[in-house]
Each structure stands twice: as structure tokens, then as C-alpha cells.
Image (cartoon, rainbow, N blue to C red):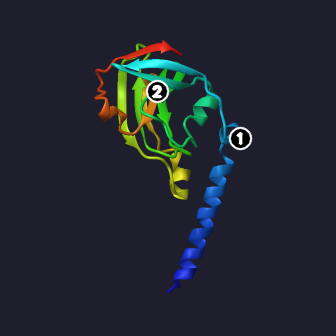
Amino acid sequence: MPTRTQVLVPILIAAIIIGVAGMLTIPTDVKLESVEFPRGTIKLDDKILEVQIADTDPLRVRGLSWQNELPYNEGMLFVFDGSGTRAMWMMGMQFNLDIIWFDENVNIVAIEKDVPQCKTTVEVVACRENGVSSDDAKYVLEVTAGFVDKFNITENSKLELISI
């Protein structure tokens, strides 16, 4: 019968290798500490939000990763060229999010509340494959967890793109 050390050492080594491999696969421009996002303003029902706009692949990959907080009057709006299945992953997130998907007519097609960040080595490795997604989305809005409930956002809520 193997000892606890004989079992734990290979598991620890595997976790370290997986963690290092996961960090090495993150694109270099995503790892930058400071990224300047274009900014805009949207209105969701009667709530006005200042948003960071992620409208290029490098900005969409970076997203809100490694930001420490997001006040309730701010968000990140992901803008895509056309509608499609939009998966969002929580790599490098420091807080949970509510995520809202919109179609090309800015109608809500899906809402996910309190999506957790990836914290442990195993979660980080699986994070890429286990994000949340929705079909037929052209826009995705990420806001701090609790926003949807606090402001009574439903699938009937209306988005207005004021300046993006």
C-alpha cells in the first residue's frame, strides 16, 4: 500500500506542470498589467453604465481578467462583428460576474448570474473549456455579480447603445 507521500508527490508535480502550462498558453498581450480599452456609455432599462469596450480579439481575450473590481455603474461590453455562439471564460478573474448576451437587435438572449472566477490550478486549466456561452449573440455585457438581481434585469430588459 503506497504511503501518503508516494501519492501526494506525483499529484503535486502534475498540478505544478498543469499550472505552468496553463500560464504559458496565455497570449502575451493578455498578461499585460495595464490595457487601455475604448470607453462608451450604454443604458440597460433605466440604469446608465460606463463600459469598457472589447471589440478586437486581443481585447476580448483580456476582458476583465486581473482587474480587482467593477462598480455597479460600470461594465465591459464585448462587441463582435456578427451574431454567433459567444463563450465567456473566467480566466484571471478576481471576482464573480453576471453576464448578459444580446442579439444584433440588442434583445437579451441569455443571462448567467454569479459566474465564478477560476481560482485553483485545476480550475485555471479547465477554465478555457468550461466557460458560459449563448447562441445568436452579437454583444455580451459583463457586470459585477449581483447586478442583474439588484437592478431587476430580465430577458425583457432593453439595452440602448448610447456611445460605443
The residue labelled by disc 1 is 28
Residue in the picture at 52% in, 44% down: 93
In the rendered image, which quarter is residue 46 located in?
top left
Numbered badge on residue 140: 2
Q: Crowding near pointer 2: few (<14 within 10 Å), some, many (20+)? A: many
The residue closer to the viewer here, 135 or 26, is: 26
x, y percentage for residue 118? 50, 50
Residue 80 lies, with reference to residue 35, above or below; the image says above
Q: At 43% across and 43% down in the image, what residue appears?
A: 96
CA separation in Å, label 1 and label 2 = 24 Å
Label 1 or label 2, whichever comes before in sequence order: 1
**Quadrant in the rendering for residue 16:** bottom right
Q: Secondary structure at mark 2?
A: strand
- Residue 15 seen in the current view: yes
Question: Pointer 1: residues within 10 angstroms few (<14), some, or many (20+)?
Answer: few
**Residue pictured at 47% horizontal, 29% vertical:** 74
Residue 139 in sight: no
Q: Position of residue 17 (x, y in %)?
A: 65, 61
Spot occupied by residue 48 in the image (x, y as percentages of width and height): 41, 21
**In the rendered structure, which amino acid carries the disc numbered 1?**
Thr
Count of picture labels: 2
The amino acid on which the numbered mark 2 sits, given as a three-letter code, is Val
Q: At which x and y percent is residue 87?
A: 48, 34
Query: In the image, is 125 to the left or to the right of 111?
Result: right
